[in-house]
Structures are given as structure tokens and as C-alpha cells.
Image: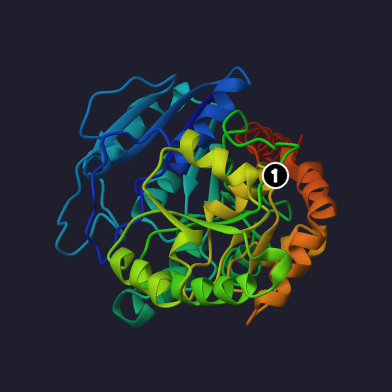
Amino acid sequence: MKVLLINCILTTAEKRVITRRASIKDCMICNFAQGFVALGHQVTILASQEFAPTQSEQYPFEIVFFPSRWPQVFHPSLLPWPIGMRQWLQQHVAEYDMVVSSEVFQLSTLIAAQCCGDKLLIWQEMVRHQRMMHRWPSRIWYRVVPQLFMRDALVVPRSEAAYRFVSHYCHQVSDRFVDHGVDGETFYPDEQSDDSLIVVARLVPGKNISSIVNKFARLLQHEAYKDYRLDIVGDGEQRELLANQAISLSISNHVVFHGYLSHSQMAVLVRRAKALLVDTMNDLNMISIVEAIASGTPIVTNTLPSTSSYIVQHGLGIARDGWNEEDLIQVIRNYEAMHRACVAVRDDVTNVGCAQKMIDIFSQWNHKDA
């Protein structure tokens, strides 16, 4: 099978500033493409030129980059308008068996809907209206565009929250979900664990990492957990602030700032930790949670991430607003059971498992009238 993946936005921009990376091999859509390749399929990705890597690299799939039209209005980090994508699709879509485009509210998806017919699946991650211009563009788009231009496409949600949101606007929505797939050969379980907890995030205010540091400090006050370590993977504007916070709490010997790590480097720390810690103030979709599940590592999170209900449903950790050191103690004490629960569902969250699920949904949809 030849698979076309349309995902213009490859990485998250901070305050609309796109930081180009030397490599994009670790980005979500490349991991997803690897899953299809592992199943024996040919894959092409269409993306925005603004996210192209700064260094030349090789992939087991093709990537075609498109520059953005009017970037001052259609910002490439939010709503890129890819120049030449319509012509490319008109010329090449007949070569592909299945097309997957990210998000209902994207110009690239509108273009794909006009060119790809019933080959198109729309992969929906958003669970609420985009905040741009007080959400008015998103509200108008969802009420008009799907009904006029996307009626032939099936929308595949990435979570239950995405399903509830997009079902208000699109009539053809799959009741099977396909989450971000992570590389199962990089993120895998370890039977041994360390006396450590881990945070994987950009060090910015919205991640609310300072609250996690405070909760970890209170955990260390318990004799049984006084030797625990908190690994913080990621970089950002709050790194110095957080380091000073650890010093002021007299726990700097227990907190390790690793900075940015590659997936292979980070995965070692994730699989050995007793839990991944999340207390975000604005993240609905966090790939780090899925990476932890694939690594057999329980999660402690608030209920904002869209995967929080999945965590509770399958016993993969704790999802509770206002969680504290007592929740950390509970996860540590129940680590073995939660670790086994993560291992039991990991095939659902690896890139290979997610790719196969997407193919199965497409095959069932494509033959619905046969």
C-alpha cells in the first residue's frame, strides 16, 4: 500500500516562533510514518518548508516540503497555506491508496478534501477551538467547511475528547481512536526500575513544572523516599528559575536537569523511572504520556491531557487534579501493577500498532458499501 501523510506543522512553536531543528526524525509524524514502513508500506509526508531540518538527513520514506503563502496572516505554526500542494495532489494522488491529513481546521486538509475524494481520512487531535483571534476563525470553519467540503472524508479522532469535540461538527466520525504512535523500538519496558521520577517537557510556564518540584520536595520528607531523584528532561526559559527553586528547597542534589535529549537518550531515563509526572496548565495532547506508556512507566497527571481518561480506565497511573505527594507514594507502592498494565496496552500506542489500526479503519470504511 502507498500511504500519503499530510501534516504541515511538524513541531510545536513557542509564541509562534518556529525553532528549526537539525533533525526531525523524532517528530510525531515521522514516527507514525515509521510504523507504516515497518508494516511494509511506502510512505510520503507533505509538510511546511518552515519546519525542514537544518541538516541533510535520510529517511525510509519521502518528505515533500512546501513554502507557506502569506505567513504574516496564515502563520506556519498555526494555519499554514502551503503553496503548490493542490497542484502536487492533483498530479500524484492517483498513485496513493490512502491519504491521512491532520486536523479538520487546516487549509491543507481542505485542499486534500477537494483533491483526494474517498481516499482521505482526517486525523483529529484538537479537542477545542483554536485560540487564534478569540476562536472565531475556528468556530466559523467547523460550522461551515466540513459540511460543504469534507462530507466524503472519515474523521479519525486521536482520543475520546477529540471524538466528543469533532462529532458536533462532522457527521462521519470513527468510534475507534488512533493516538500518536511512538517508536516501539526506542520506547520499550525494562524489568528493572530506579528510585526516580521523571518530567519530560519544555521548561516554560504553561508546563507548571515548579508545582511538580514542590510536590517532589514534600515526597523527600518521607523517610522511605528520601533518596529519590527527579529527572527533568527538556530546556526552556524557566531552567534557571527551576534550578534556583531546587536550591531554595534544599533538594538540588535530588534534581537533575538533563536539557534536551534525543529520543534514544531520553527513553533510558523514562523506562527506568517509577512514574512520569505531569501538571500542565494548557496541554491537551502530550506525546510524553504515550512514550511513558510504551515504556511501561506509570503516569501521574492532572485531568487536562486528553489521555487522562485512558490512564484511569486501564489503571496506568493516577489522573487527578491537584495531585500531591500522597499520589506519588501511591504510584510508587503500586508500581509493579501499573507497570504491567502499561505493558499490556503498549501495542495500542506504538507506531506500528497505530499504523495498523489506521489501515484497519480505512479498509472497513472503504468497503462499507461493498
Name the residue furthest right: 337
User: Can residue 179 be seen in the rendering of this structure?
Assistant: no
* In-image side of 337 versus 3 (left or right): right
Quadrant holding the C terminus: top right
Q: Residue at x 39, y 71 (%)?
A: 247
The answer to whether residue 114 is visible is yes
**Location of residue 77 (image quadrant):** bottom left
Q: Which residue is denoted by mark 1 in the rendering?
A: 193
Residue 93 percent location from the top left of the image? 43, 29
Q: Residue 314, located in which quarter of the rendered image?
A: bottom right
Instruction: State whether residue 140 is above or below residue 157.
Output: below
Residue 365 placed where, x, y %?
70, 41
Left or right: residue 175 versus residue 282 is: right
In the rendered image of this protein, does residue 15 appear above or below residue 178? below
Image coordinates for residue 293, horizontal then vertical, percent: 68, 48
Viewer-nearest residue: 260 or 307: 260
Q: What residue is at 80 percent from the left and 54 percent from the top?
A: 338
- For the residue labelled by badge 1, is the local secondary structure a helix, a strand or a loop? loop
Quarter of the image with the N terminus is top right
301 or 128: nearer the viewer: 301
Residue 101 point in image, percent of width and height: 47, 45
Is 24 in front, or is 359? 24
Image check: 55 left or right of 108? left
Q: Residues within 10 Å of mark 1 (few under 14, many from 20)?
A: some
136 with respect to 168 (left or right) = left
> By what rule are the colours in the image chosen?
rainbow
- Give the quarter of the image for residue 56: top left
At horizontal 36% and vertical 79% (from top left) the residue drawn is 136
Say what amino acid the circle numbered 1 marks.
Ser
Total tally of numbered discs in the picture: 1
